[in-house]
Amino acid sequence: MIGTGYVGLVSGACFADFGHQVTCVDKDADKIASLRRGEIPIFEPGLDALVASNVKAGRLDFATDLAVPVAEADAVFIAVGTPSRRGDGHADLSYVHTAAREIAAALEGFTVVVTKSTVPVGTGDEVERLIRETNPSADVEVASNPEFLREGAAIRDFKFPDRIVVGSSDERARKVLGDVYRPLSLNQAPLMFTARRTAELIKYAANAFLATKITFINEIADLAEKVGADVQEVARGIGLDNRIGSKFLHAGPGFGGSCFPKDTRALVKIALDHDVPLRIVEAVLAVNDNRKRAMARKVAGAVGASLRGKTIAVLGLTFKPNTDDMREAPAIAVVQALVDAGATIRAYDPQGMEAATNLLPPIDYADSAYDAAEGADCIVIVTEWNEFRSLDFKRLKKSMKTPALVDLRNIYKRAEIESQGFAYESIGRR
Ligand SMILES: NC(=O)c1ccc[n+]([C@@H]2O[C@H](COP(=O)([O-])OP(=O)(O)OC[C@H]3O[C@@H](n4cnc5c(N)ncnc54)[C@H](O)[C@@H]3O)[C@@H](O)[C@H]2O)c1
């Protein structure tokens, strides 16, 4: 497994748990050293125990140099990052290309090189070209196997996937990947074989569709506020239709995270390169970008128009609960907009504060939700961690300057909060 980040570490640990022999490789020597000490560099529920048990069983180890593990491998997965390229929003493939060249030089015997990173259509062709250029005699097939796991539920998603997509037209490669995933197909997880380019497009199309669903309900939420409807009931009313489905219809402050923003941006660029503009996805991106900052206006409304001189307690910074991942979290834009408007921020997140310090303007960090709310004019829930779902409002009211709650995740009911003497704002519910 080349690249031991959120995807590489979870995939590597799960493959080892299936009984395979796995080496997770990463160039980041500190990361590998901490994994060897038994420390997990990311927060993902259940990952520490899974890694520990598979290391103990001798099926999982860690390395900074890929030469030996690649030479011994039947399958080499590329799980390095593909961030947005600075300046133009294309996927930055430099890590994938470097990994491909390094793998090429180490190959021995028949090997399937599998791109698990999310990559633009045609990247498999380029990976194959780079490998053949670097090592013309290599007996290699290049396949695509996009990953669909969600951070926060990554192990469950990996072990009980809705489907596994394998993009390769080569029988030997299909056999190796069929064997790698056999434990899952025994669990009835559909293993879908398709062409490499189709597999690459499936991943982007899936993420763009999910981002569209979120953005759609967010716009309906704005309309619901104006017309006096309740977006949660609208979502339930449409979601019960099997053709629509109830997932990803939760109105909120806009999507963020390490995948949807960068993948929708990259898909728009891929489409433009092929002269097929994807207008819907372009609109999704634009709407979502504006939305995050606009959340500050909601907070301003809750504290009486101006944020200048107000203290705002921000609860939840990560892009979703149960992760420490701050990449493109809506909280970044929300906090920045609040600071720009003159507010003082006291923030608390159960796992994300360390990563947040590099991404947010200078703000105060608190030890708990209650600590953050001390003396505040308003609480804003940005990320719906479980510990924010049953706050003690009597206690909060005593320590806050003015009791107000802006619930950007709709986790509370208006009547319940107003009965505690709080002003209450949420999304798409008047
Ligand atoms: N994070 C998710 O939830 C998720 C879900 C599905 C797909 N993906 C995709 O998977 C890919 C990886 O995402 P991530 O979130 O795990 O990234 P990450 O940034 O957490 O990890 C990438 C790792 O690769 C390492 N690396 C880079 N170049 C290397 C090289 N040549 N050799 C060895 N190691 C190298 C980096 O040091 C880093 O540790 C991306 O393409 C992403 O879009 C991510």
Image (cartoon, rainbow, N blue to C red):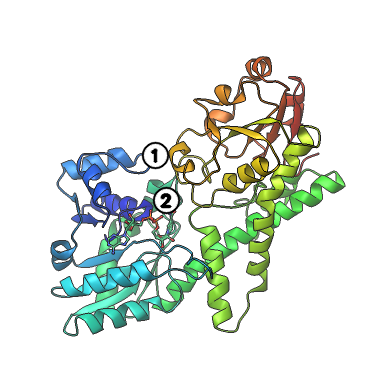
- Residue 414 picture location, percent across and down: 75, 30
Callout 2: few (<14), some (14-19), or many (20+) C-alpha neighbours within 10 Å? some
In the picture, measured across the screen, residue 350 lies left or right of residue 396, that is left
Q: Is residue 423 above or below residue 64?
A: above
Q: What is the three-letter code of the residue carrying label 2?
A: Asp
- Residue 13 picture location, percent across and down: 28, 49
Indicate the quadrant of ligand 1 in the picture: bottom left
Quarter the N terminus occupies: bottom left
Helix, strand or loop at mark 2: helix
Q: Is residue 153 visible?
A: yes
Q: Is residue 123 above or below residue 327?
A: below
Q: Residue at x 22, y 40 (%)?
A: 53
Callout 1: few (<14), some (14-19), or many (20+) C-alpha neighbours within 10 Å? some
Q: Residue at x 29, y 56 (%)?
A: 183
Q: Residue at x 69, y 59 (%)?
A: 287
Helix, strand or loop at mark 1: loop
In the picture, measured across the screen, residue 223 lies left or right of residue 18, that is right
Instruction: Out of 13 and 371, give the one closest to the viewer.
Output: 371
Instruction: Out of 182 and 4, give the one closest to the viewer.
Output: 4
The residue pinned by badge 1 equals 45
- Residue 282 picture location, percent across and down: 65, 68
